[in-house]
């Protein structure tokens, strides 16, 4: 059984990035913290760009953070608030990451 997660951007309601494998904090939080801190320092809030660059980061930073390399499964863009996952991460506008279990 996998430990899935949903990653959201604070100022972009109703959409999220679904991560099917290794969604627990030890595997996911270092990647999200580095990504959100750097993005916020360089670009500010900009939620649409943050979400797009988060998706790109899952590929660019795959080796550094041991993210799932599959091109066919393991990741998805989801709409709506009905999704229930083991973990939910919110990329805050101030560059931090909030975890909801």
Image (spheres, rainbow, N blue to C red):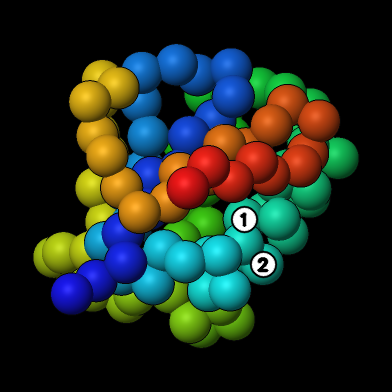
Callout 1 crowding tier (Cα within 10 Å): few <14, some 14–19, many ≥20: many
Q: Nearer the viewer, residue 31 or 101?
A: 101
Q: Residue at x 45, y 16 (%)?
A: 13
User: Which quadrant would residue 80 be assigned to in this image?
Assistant: top left
> Is any part of residue 46 visible from this angle?
yes
Tag 2's secondary structure? helix
Tag 1's secondary structure? helix
Q: Which residue is mark 1?
A: 32
Q: Nearer the viewer, residue 93 or 85?
A: 85
Name the quarter where the N terminus is drawn: bottom left
9 vs 36: above or below: above
Q: Residue at x 57, y 37 (%)?
A: 90
Q: Is residue 95 left or right of residue 76?
A: right
Q: Position of residue 3 (x, y in %)?
A: 32, 66
Distance, label 2 to label 1, CA atoms, is 6 Å
58 vs 56: above or below: below
Q: Residue at x 36, y 18 (%)?
A: 14
Q: Position of residue 53 (x, y in %)?
A: 53, 44
Q: Is residue 62 left or right of residue 43?
A: left
Q: Is residue 18 left or right of residue 29?
A: left
Q: Which residue is mark 2?
A: 30
- Residue projecting furthest to the right: 41
Are the residues tagged 2 and 1 within 8 Å (C-beta)? yes
> Is any part of residue 55 visible from this angle?
no
Q: Position of residue 58 (x, y in %)?
A: 45, 61
Callout 2 crowding tier (Cα within 10 Å): few <14, some 14–19, many ≥20: few
66 vs 54: above or below: below
Disc on res. 52: none
């Amino acid at each position: 059984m996998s430990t899935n997660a949903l990653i959201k951007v604070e100022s972009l309601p109703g959409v999220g990035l679904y991560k099917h494998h290794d969604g627990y904090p030890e595997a996911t939080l270092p990647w999200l913290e580095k990504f959100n801190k750097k993005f916020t320092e360089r670009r500010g809030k900009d939620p649409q760009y943050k979400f797009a660059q988060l998706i790109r980061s899952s590929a660019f930073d795959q080796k550094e953070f041991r993210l799932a390399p599959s091109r066919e499964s393991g990741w998805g863009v989801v709409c709506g608030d009905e999704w229930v996952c083991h973990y939910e991460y919110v990329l805050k506008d101030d560059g931090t990451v909030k975890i909801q279990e």
